Image (cartoon, helix red, strand yellow):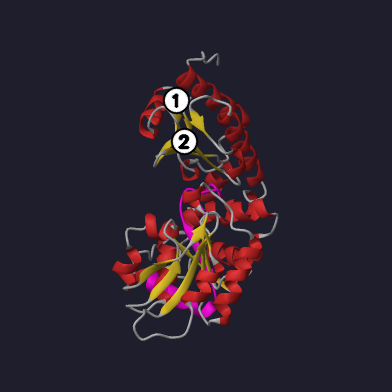
Amino acid sequence: MVIDLRSDFIARPTQAMVEAMSLAAEIPGGFGPREDPTVMRLEALAAKTLGKPDALFVPTCMMANQIAIHLRCRPGDAFLTEAEAHVVTSESAAASALSGAMPRLLAATNGALDPDAVAAALGPADAQRARVGLILQENTHVRSGGRVIPYQHMQNVSQIARAGGVPVHLDGARVFNAATALGRPACDLAALADTVSFNLNKGLGAPLGAILAGPAELIAEAVRVRQMFGGGWRPAGIPAAAGIVALETMIDRMSEDHANARGLSEGLAEIDGLSVDPGATETNIVLARPTGTSSEVLAEALAERGVLVLPFGPCIRLVTHHEITEDAVAETLAVFRSVLTGEKNGS
């Protein structure tokens, strides 16, 4: 048996999702960009879940982020974010290439923008500086290991942004993990941003797809930008059907993924040869730093024993999802002990 902890998007869809997709395949798809009945149901459900007027189904969360940037930034504009944000590290400089917008990198701690830095960046207009078209926050923050930006902190940044007349976009690829960790509904976090994106195929477990939610007039314009960016997929009812099931059935069980991640983090912290801070495991992502070898060498040794992890700079990353059970956590820990300490894996 292979235990794949490289990402939550690797998880297979649930049986309920498979059945929903099979049924959707029998429903005639719409011809126009917003005519497919199953897609329309998904978009309405996503908008309601986040407390937004409208939502748009797109192929990836990266596309959702880039549409949001394009809608707010003119060529030559800047958007405020931080150096480890996904839009900076993992989106191929798309904001510059597609929208002529540049990231202005502010001080941050585990993805949480420094409110004073935000306020300073929104200071008096200066003809020598780029106009700020957008503020982008990411919650959870993937590069820090799924850390959660506190609600009050997001609220502070939102208030500064609104006072300065600048919209906020929430890159919420795993926003439901953040909401679960904070003990709040996702709509509370979404209310602190003008637009919100989230993945359907990460913590929610659908096979693919993402959502961009926001004001109705902006989402109407987003349909055109989605087409321009090559995301005008149709018919898309089959993946949309899985997304509906994901939103209806997977949010309430995310606490199980978080509990398994904590168990994994605590167990790894007890193994010689690893540096792990269990207190930093706030959602479903665990970062562990090998102390006697490289992350690549350790990942290769684990893979030979059926445990797949992701080299993540000097660390390895492990992500729990609905297919990672308590038994899988126990087996993973046994394999780590076998690889790092020579302890025999008795399973």
**Residue at disc 1, secondary structure:** loop
- 306, 78: nearer the viewer: 78
In terms of sequence position, does the residue under pointer 1 or pointer 2 come before the other?
Answer: 2
Q: Do the residues labelled 1 and 2 touch (CB within 8 Å)?
A: no
Query: What are the residue bounds of the magenta stretch?
Result: 199-226
**Residue at disc 2, secondary structure:** strand
In the rendered image, the residue lying farthest to the right is: 183
Query: Which label number is shown at residue 306?
Result: 1
Please rate how many residues cluster around mark 1, counting C-alpha atoms within 10 Å: few if below 14, some from 14 to 19, many from 20: some
Q: What amino acid is at disc 1?
A: Gly
What residue is shown at x 62% (from left), y 64% (from top)? 153
Pinpoint residue 106: horizontal percent, then vertical percent.
45, 65
What residue is shown at x 46% (from left), y 50% (from top)? 143
Quickly name the residue at label 2: 289
Please rate how many residues cluster around mark 2, counting C-alpha atoms within 10 Å: few if below 14, some from 14 to 19, many from 20: many
Q: Can residue 15 be seen in this view?
A: yes
